Amino acid sequence: MKRNSRSGPVDHMLLTTIRKEPGLSLYELGQVMRWSNGKVDGSLRRLLNERKIVINAIERNGRPVHLVYPKRRLPYNMVEIPKSLLKLGNPTWKDAAFFYALDNLSFGITGRRFVDWERVSSFTEKVKLLNEKDRLVVTIPEKFVNFYRLSEKRLTKSIADNNVLLTINGTIIENMAYPAK
């Protein structure tokens, strides 16, 4: 597809805004940029096809909404957990993480066995923990990736009582035909 020479600066301005304010809808981006919906839509499609952004399709107030985010920097099968949000100590969050499939929309991660989650989980798995300076990084087991279809989904991370709850909250759109059908 031939690219209009004027689209480069427009796309750059929109991508800068998306990086500063991730999670806005097409309409909200138009309001922030003071652009028409058509101008925003054209630029979003180019950025999406260049794989610089992803779109999270969710439902808001009973209507479908597409929220725009910069392309993920971590692969979909990795989770970062800031150390500042956890109580680290022996043996919790030392060298292993425990995964629990809680229901069809959420799974939990703990730094030690958690009997309450173990009892209600469809399946569990223990994985090695990568301990970095200010964060912990875990690779989500393949069984979880496949069951929750994580390559197509967006996750929300919540941390409470030293446990991490990951909730699936939307479908990721990585390309969009032009024009939309």
Image (cartoon, helix red, strand yellow):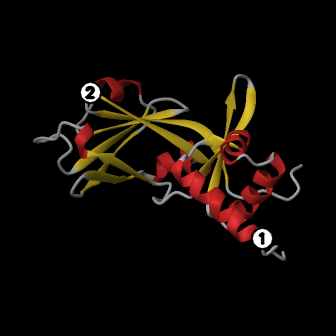
Residue 17 location, x and y as percent?
A: 59, 53
Q: Is residue 9 left or right of residue 180?
A: left
Q: Is residue 172 visible?
A: yes
The crowd level at tag 1 (other Cα within 10 Å; few <14, some 14-19, many 20+) is few
Q: 112 or 33: which is nearer to us?
A: 33
Question: Which of the two discs, 2 and 1, sits closer to the camera?
Answer: 1
Secondary structure at badge 2 equals loop
Residue sitting farthest toward the left: 90
The amino acid beneath tag 1 is Arg
Q: 26 or 104: which is nearer to us?
A: 26
Q: Earlier in the sequence, mark 2 or mark 1?
A: 1
Q: CA distance from mark 2 to mark 1?
A: 51 Å
Q: Residue at x 81, y 47 (%)?
A: 36
Q: Is residue 41 left or right of residue 110?
A: right
The crowd level at tag 2 (other Cα within 10 Å; few <14, some 14-19, many 20+) is few
The amino acid beneath tag 2 is Asp
Q: Quadrant of the N terminus?
A: bottom right
Q: Are marks 2 and 1 in contact (CB under 8 Å)?
A: no
Q: Residue at x 42, y 51 (%)?
A: 141
**In the picture, residue 165 is in which quadrant?**
top left
Residue 2 location, x and y as percent?
A: 84, 77
| Mark 2, residue position | 161
Q: Return the mark for residue 6.
A: 1
**In the picture, residue 84 is in which quadrant?**
top left
Residue 64 location, x and y as percent?
A: 74, 33
* Picture layout, residue 7 above or below residue 64: below
Q: Residue at x 52, y 57 (%)?
A: 72
